Amino acid sequence: MTKFTEALQQAGGPEWLRNKRQESLALFTSLEVPTEQVEAWKYTRVDVDFDSLQPHPKRDAVQDASQLPQSVQKRLNSTDAGAFLVFDGPDVVYRTELPAELTAKGVIFTDLKTAVEQHADLVQQYLYSVVPAEVPDDTTIAAPGTTPSKSPDPSEGKFSALAAALWTNGAFVYVPRGVEVELPLASFRVMSAADSYTATRTLVVAEDNAGVTLIDEQDSEPLQNAYAIGAVELVVKSGARLRYVSIQNWGKGVTHIQRQRADVARDGKLNSLVVTMGGTLSRTEMQSYVRGSGAESEMLALYFADEDQHFDHYTLQHHAAPNAYSDLLYKGVGADQSVGVFSGMIKVDLGAQKTDAYQKHRTMMLSSEARNFSVPQLEINANDVRCSHGSTTGPVGEQELFYLRSRGISKETAEKMLVTAFLEDVLGRVPLKSVTDYIEGIIAEKVGAV
């Protein structure tokens, strides 16, 4: 792992951050790669030769958006973001500034590397607080004399430790108490080098009664033997409102591994959307720690796997306080020889009475050769709750398809219409038209309807 040690030396930063990076690398080195023997990774195996990994080459900033990749230009032309950052590998290559009135109110939107230099106290306070290097111990607090859930296998933190050690950059958002950011902020990340890796980190802090939306998009051309490893930390303070949208559309050949985790305080509200469309192998973990009474967490996701893509989603709704609400809706589409995996858990701690928690996963199969594994779970340690979970998997409706074809509609267009309709109850909850239009465009490409 000599090259990783060299990467740490080049990362620099204040002493506390260098120490944290070194601790994280030591943890990474001590852990095994999770295998199918680990329950949370039962259906997904990552074959990676860490010794062969090379950091993504550095990129210079451009002065004009016309110098950015075509895919990014296309997104920027349709975005309604109030400000945005564009990353190519480890570097910010283009940015726009926040409106002056938001800066005057204390809102910060910059890259994390710059934030470490210019807002050191804030970054030190929150960085690694929600997604530490090790896997969080989300064991349920159970009643005396009962057996709580098992702690996570340490190997589940292998990639989180690597991301904690080697992250080079990412978005940093800070919204002070009582400030509302009306227009969304956006981060566009691309990779442009095969046989390389990036390690990124996103940190969003919404103070008491603040409000903000962050759109976090990832895109690339096909890149063989490329790895995108990341962490997303979402801090939702009392009464705050945070909407976080992650759209992963890497090119074929990219392996995507990311842990997203939110800490939602009293009366805070989180709305998250995870969209998985690209890459060859994708493992996304979305965890919500509902630790305050009156807190709300809405966790949405949609994915469309085709060809030989393998998409794995692991979710956790952990209720640690009474009178809180969470709702999870994940919908996916499987085509060709793809594999889809969903493993979701609702945990309710002892004392978290009046919890209201729901979990639903539904999959539409466009091919008899596609496979889907779904494992919804509940672990309840309070006796006055409303919790439910469910999962369904089924083929595309033959009658609906026949009806559309009989009206002269092509097979590709008919499938696009049925898939879009199937995913509509997720898309309909997202009040960001430019985002939903972009997602529908990717769906059309996947079914050949463009």
Image (cartoon, rainbow, N blue to C red):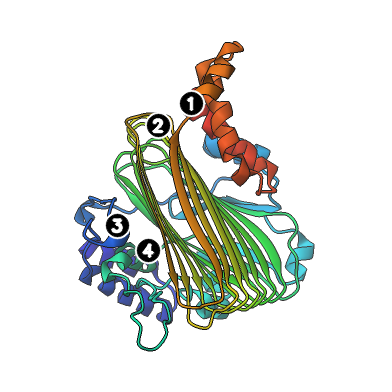
Amino acid beneath label 2: Ala
Question: Which residue lies under the disc numbered 1?
Answer: 447
Query: Sequence-wise, which precedes: disc 1 or disc 3?
Result: 3
Q: Earlier in the sequence, mark 2 or mark 3?
A: 3
Foreground pick, 392 / 173 = 392
Q: CA distance from mark 1 to mark 2?
A: 9 Å
Q: Are marks 1 and 4 in contact (CB under 8 Å)?
A: no
Is residue 231 shown to the viewer in this render? no
Marks 2 and 4 sit apart, C-alpha to C-alpha, by 31 Å
> How many C-alpha atoms fall within 10 Å of the one at disc 2: few (<14), some, or many (≥20)?
many
Disc 1 residue crowd, few under 14, some 14–19, many 20+, Cα 10 Å: many
Residue at point 26%, 52% (across, down): 53
> In this figure, which residue is indicated by the disc labeled 3?
41
Residue 199 rendering spot, x and y as whole percentages:
39, 58
Q: Quadrant of the C terminus?
A: top right
- Observer-side mark, 1 or 4, equals 1
Say which residue label 4 marks. 163
Residue 107, percent from left and from top: 69, 68
The correct choice, above or below, for 49 with respect to 9 in the image is: above
Return the residue at label 2. Answer: 335
Numbered mark located on residue 426 in the image? none
Q: Marks 1 and 2: CB-CB under 8 Å?
A: yes
